[in-house]
Amino acid sequence: MLPQLLARRSTLNVSLAKDGSAPQPNEVYVIPPAVFLSIASGRLRFSPAQTDKGARMPIDVFLNSLAADRGRHGIGIIMSGTGTDGGDGLKVLKEAGGLVLVQDPNEAQQDGMPRYAMRTARPDYVLPVR
């Protein structure tokens, strides 16, 4: 139901990501349950989620693949959330020359992910969502 919920708040098209598809401009893709999403050769790729190896970090998985596939052409954004997922992937993306953005944690409903990303990745910009 996440695509439908996000679509109510976005002017962009929101849909469930499809394995093998090429991302399109002005589209928002939601990861399906029980898979990791990555990008390779410009295509979205699914792999089974590893549930027996500690915390599931799907954002880090995607951002690491984005850094490898797109390098300085990649853009990573971390917004409101709890925990640490995304911070390490943003660091890798920044090291690859990509643009790294983080939501201002003072306006985030949950500030754990933005604060961790700020400490870990040294983002290019920390900005309000607007």
Image: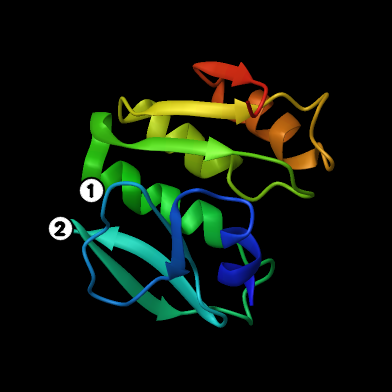
Residue 80 in the image, given as x and y percentages of width and height: 73, 42
Which residue occupies the foreground of this view, 36 or 15?
15
For marks 2 and 1, give the CA distance. Answer: 6 Å
Q: Which residue is mark 1?
A: 69
Is 109 positioned to the left or the right of 65 in the image?
Answer: right
How many numbered marks does the figure carry? 2
Is disc 2 in contact with disc 1, using a CB cutoff of under 8 Å?
yes
Residue 20 in the image, given as x and y percentages of width and height: 23, 74
Q: Secondary structure at mark 2?
A: loop
Q: If the image is split into quadrants, where does the C terminus sit?
A: top right
Tell me: residue 52, above or below residue 128: below
Please report whichever mark, 2 or 1, sits nearer to the chain's N-terminal start: 2
Q: Residue 21 appears in which quarter of the rendering?
A: bottom left
Q: What kind of residue is marked 2?
A: Ser
Q: What kind of residue is marked 1?
A: Asp
Q: Which residue is mark 2?
A: 41
Residue 117 in the image, given as x and y percentages of width and height: 64, 33
